[in-house]
Amino acid sequence: MSQEIKLSIISGSHRQQSESVKIARAVEHQLSTLDGVSRDNVGVNLSVDLSVDLIDLANTKLPLWDVTFENIEQQQIELLADQLEDSDGFVFVVPEWHGMVPAAVKNFFLHYSGGQLAHKPALIIAVSAGEGGAYPIVELRSSSYKNSRICYLPEHLIIRRVQSVFNTDSENHPESQSYLERRMTHCLNLLVSYSLALRGVRQELPAETEFSNGM
Ligand SMILES: Cc1cc2nc3c(=O)[nH]c(=O)nc-3n(C[C@H](O)[C@H](O)[C@H](O)COP(=O)(O)O)c2cc1C
């Protein structure tokens, strides 16, 4: 039995050539090594075919949320909404900027808290050039799920000293690289398992609710 799963990776830095997009590409690569892996879920052999989109908020410039938009902006917003609707799960690669997530990430959630992410699993990967990276995890976990109904995995990754790992054109710190690769694979395997499982949850949800927003 084979199941198709679509994942979207969102790189949350709006800097060109960011370290976050470097990590997002590493995630994309690592997911490609999981592709078609035979998985043994509660005794059932499931072969999973993964397709992966990478959305770099440095290039996909969403307009700041407003009540109305120009036609061209509206089309862009809807195009991405369709892409997110089609996704079974997400990876958010988010840098720490002044102890916060970048404005583009906040703006993303202002645009897409209308069901596109609802009851779908998401892995948070925080990125820091130094010893930071805890704040984006806390911020996303505490403030982005209420109306989006996104389901963050109970595992996350923090990539500290990001310039020393996941480089394709320069040296990597051997121990950190090996450790983070193993943890990333573990987290991505969890994301695939949750993506399969939460599909079943979404099928069982009541068709209508009077509570369009979370409490
Ligand atoms: C405006 C700005 C603020 C930053 N503030 C922090 C911070 O509070 N903590 C931290 O660990 N790194 C901070 N950094 C450094 C980032 O960790 C570093 O740029 C890293 O490469 C991740 O960002 P990027 O994906 O945009 O490259 C900041 C960077 C910028 C551009």
Image: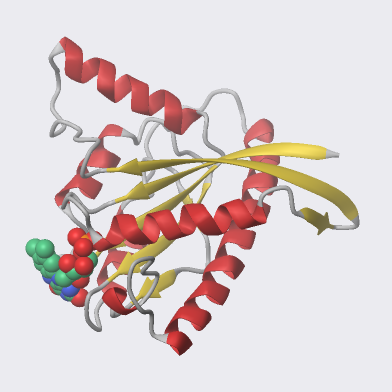
Q: Is residue 133 visible?
A: no
Quarter of the displayed picture in which ligand 1 can be seen = bottom left
Percent position of residue 183, x then y: 54, 74
Percent position of residue 96, x then y: 22, 67
Colour approach in the figure: secondary structure
Percent position of residue 100, x then y: 18, 64
Q: Residue at point 18% right, 14% down? A: 72
Q: Is residue 57 left or right of residue 15?
A: right
Is 47 placed above or below 29 here? above
Is 39 placed above or below 204 here? below
Give whichever of 55, 84 is nearer the camera.
55
User: In which quarter of the view is residue 158 placed?
Assistant: bottom left
Give whichever of 61, 176 is nearer the camera.
176
Q: Residue at point 61% right, 29% down? A: 206
Give whichever of 143, 70 is nearer the camera.
70
Q: Is residue 111 left or right of residue 173?
A: left
**Residue placed furthest toward the right:** 43
**Residue placed furthest toward the front:** 169
* Tag count: 0
Q: Residue at point 43% right, 71% down? A: 157
Q: Quadrant of the N terminus?
A: top right
**Residue placed furthest toward the bottom:** 175
